[in-house]
Amino acid sequence: MLNKWNLREIVLMAILGVVFAVIYLFFFTVGTGITNILTPFGLGPFGYEVIFGIWFIVSIITAYIIRKPGAALISETIAGGVQVLLGSPAGPMLIVSAFIQGLGAESVFAATKYRNYSKGVLIAAGIGPAIFSFIWGLYHSGYIALSLPLLSSMLIVRVISGALIAGLLGKWIAERLAETGVLRSYTLGKEWQTKREQKAS
């Protein structure tokens, strides 16, 4: 999968995986706080759902920047592995969850044959892991025991979170990085450089 990648791309993917592993761990605490706030109102199950998209974001950012097969899947899996090494309370199974989330995003990019990175595709790539992870959670996290209305509501909130946080916010972050010029050696950076030259001419 990495035979067509250069060393610079592999290094960037690894760096992003590590950086977002730390961010993901921080948001685990945030999710716990939101859950504690919502629980007295009977909305505890939505504590993590409203921010669940943050745990897919590295797959969108990496894929959008590098635009090669495997970028979404591998970067998300790296982030999961690093979280485990850092002592995530989720334990080793987090790597499996990360792989499944990465697969959800990767499947969307694969469906376009890695040729389309439009806003709509990035939003869909944020929704993909929301659906994949929710199906995994039905059994791994015991969601299957919940009522159908609650399950449906949780899925809707997770899908919206994936679309907005992973898809749109991920796109915005990648483009802000491209604007700084630090990505000039990568596909997204070259695309933005071309746009700047066209505006200047």
Image (cartoon, rainbow, N blue to C red):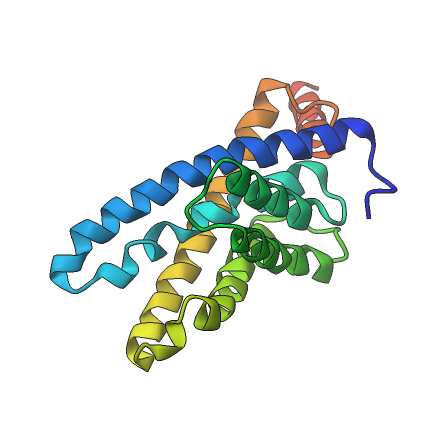
Looking at this view, is 112 or 23 the one in front?
23
* Residue located at (32% from left, 70% from top): 153
The picture places residue 27, in percent across and down from the top left corner, at: 37, 41
* Residue located at (28% from left, 48% from top): 32
Q: Is residue 124 left or right of residue 147?
A: right
* Quadrant position of residue 71: top right
Q: Residue furthest left?
A: 40
Looking at this view, is 175 or 94 the one in front?
94
The picture places residue 2, in percent across and down from the top left corner, at: 82, 43
Looking at this view, is 152 or 29 the one in front?
29
The picture places residue 137, in percent across and down from the top left corner, at: 46, 67
Figure check: 76 above or below 110: above
Figure check: 138 above or below 103: below
Q: Quadrant of the C terminus?
A: top right
The picture places residue 154, in percent across and down from the top left corner, at: 34, 66
Q: Residue furthest right?
A: 3
Figure check: 14 above or below 88: above
* Residue located at (76% from left, 49% from top): 69
How many badges with numbers are in the image?
0
Q: Is residue 7 left or right of residue 151?
A: right
* Residue located at (29% from left, 78% from top): 149
